[in-house]
């Protein structure tokens, strides 16, 4: 679940200062609801270039979400396309989660994510992730970019891979369910339905039950082309809540 929201998420500056948006970036605004009640708003910016990609997301609690999980997290990544997928170069995430300040900055060298900054420090909130488990892992925003590009190129979303966010290492996968027409912005459009799954394999938070924390987290996403400047992007993601009911992330508007 967290992959898609921090993302869905849920998803970059190696040589430029963080906070500068490329001129051609497109902004998408998503709303996350739980049993129909708005709890999170996510603003995401995308730019795909022939040689690479740039993405930024801001996730913040709204409405009653501020009572149960107050947060505002800003994430940014820049990377290059490779024949075998994506190669993130720099990932940064910062903000607050339930009143605690967080900051992560990672560079990638020969397939190994390297943490330049980590607040709180490694091991303070989660069990440390062994170095061998980090090799080849990408961040959640880069996984989003890879899925979107794969759908654009192949019309399918069959992918697997490791994700590392500086504290947690997850296995994630997506599989093609099929084409389906859905209603978006008052119109019926063609979309690709994909089954998603993530599973925590290392970096369990202190105090959590490891058996429960490492259970697979399923989700379903619908991707569609809604703007000529963008490849197919999720217009809806649904996943079971860890508390009760179903959560839905839905595209509200582009600008």
Image (cartoon, grey):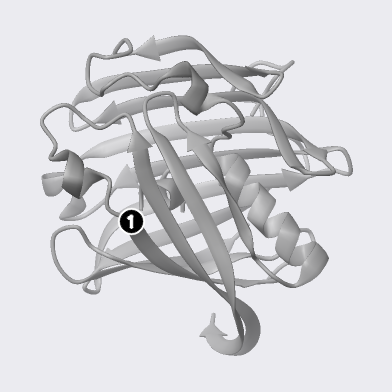
Q: What element carries label 1?
A: loop
Please, which residue is most extreme toward the front here?
A: 132
Q: Which residue is drawn at 35% across and 53% down?
A: 1
Residue closer to the observer: 32 or 134? 134
Q: Where is residue 224 in the image (x, y as percent from the top left)?
A: 65, 73
Judge by depth and name the residue closer to the eye, 74 or 210.
Answer: 210
Does residue 196 appear left or right of residue 188 in this picture?
left
Quadrant of res 159: bottom right
- Farthest residue, direction right: 50
Task: Say if 52 sits above or below 5 in the image.
Answer: above
Location of the C terminus by quadrant is bottom right
Total labels: the figure holds 1
The residue under the point 22% across, 44% down is 213
Q: What percent of the width, then of the height, locates residue 122?
A: 33, 13
Residue 92, can we see it?
no
Residue 50 vs 177, above or below: the answer is above
Residue beneath the point at 14% across and 36% down: 208
Quick check: 204 above or below 173?
above
The residue where tag 1 is placed is 216
- Across and down, in percent, residue 119 comes to 34, 13
Crowdedness of circle 1 by 10 Å Cα count: few (<14), some, many (20+)? Answer: some
Q: Which of 217 and 99 is in front in this view?
A: 217
* Rendered location of residue 78, percent (x, y): 68, 31
Can residue 45 be seen here? The reply is: yes
């Amino acid at each position: 679940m967290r992959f898609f929201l921090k993302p869905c998420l849920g998803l970059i500056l190696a040589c430029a200062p963080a906070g500068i948006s490329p001129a051609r970036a497109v902004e998408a605004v998503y709303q996350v609801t739980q049993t129909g009640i708005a709890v999170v708003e996510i603003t995401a910016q995308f730019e795909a270039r022939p040689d690479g990609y740039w993405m930024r997301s801001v996730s913040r609690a709204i409405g009653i979400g501020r009572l149960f999980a107050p947060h505002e997290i800003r994430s940014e990544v820049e990377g290059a396309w490779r024949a075998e997928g994506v190669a993130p170069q720099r990932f940064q995430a910062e903000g607050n989660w339930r009143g605690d300040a967080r900051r992560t900055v990672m560079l990638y060298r020969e397939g190994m994510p390297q943490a330049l900054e980590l607040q709180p420090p490694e091991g303070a909130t989660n069990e440390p992730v062994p170095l061998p488990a980090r090799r080849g892992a990408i961040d959640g925003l880069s996984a989003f970019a890879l899925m979107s590009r794969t759908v654009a190129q192949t019309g399918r979303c069959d992918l697997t891979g490791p994700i590392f966010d500086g504290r947690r290492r997850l296995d994630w996968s997506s599989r093609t369910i099929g084409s389906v027409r859905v209603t978006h912005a008052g119109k019926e459009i063609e979309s690709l339905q994909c089954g998603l799954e993530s599973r925590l394999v290392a970096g369990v938070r202190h105090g959590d039950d490891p058996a429960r924390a490492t259970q697979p987290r399923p989700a379903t996403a619908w991707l569609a082309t809604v703007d000529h400047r963008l490849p197919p992007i999720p217009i809806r993601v649904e996943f079971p809540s860890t508390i009760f009911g179903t959560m839905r992330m839905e595209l509200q508007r582009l600008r």
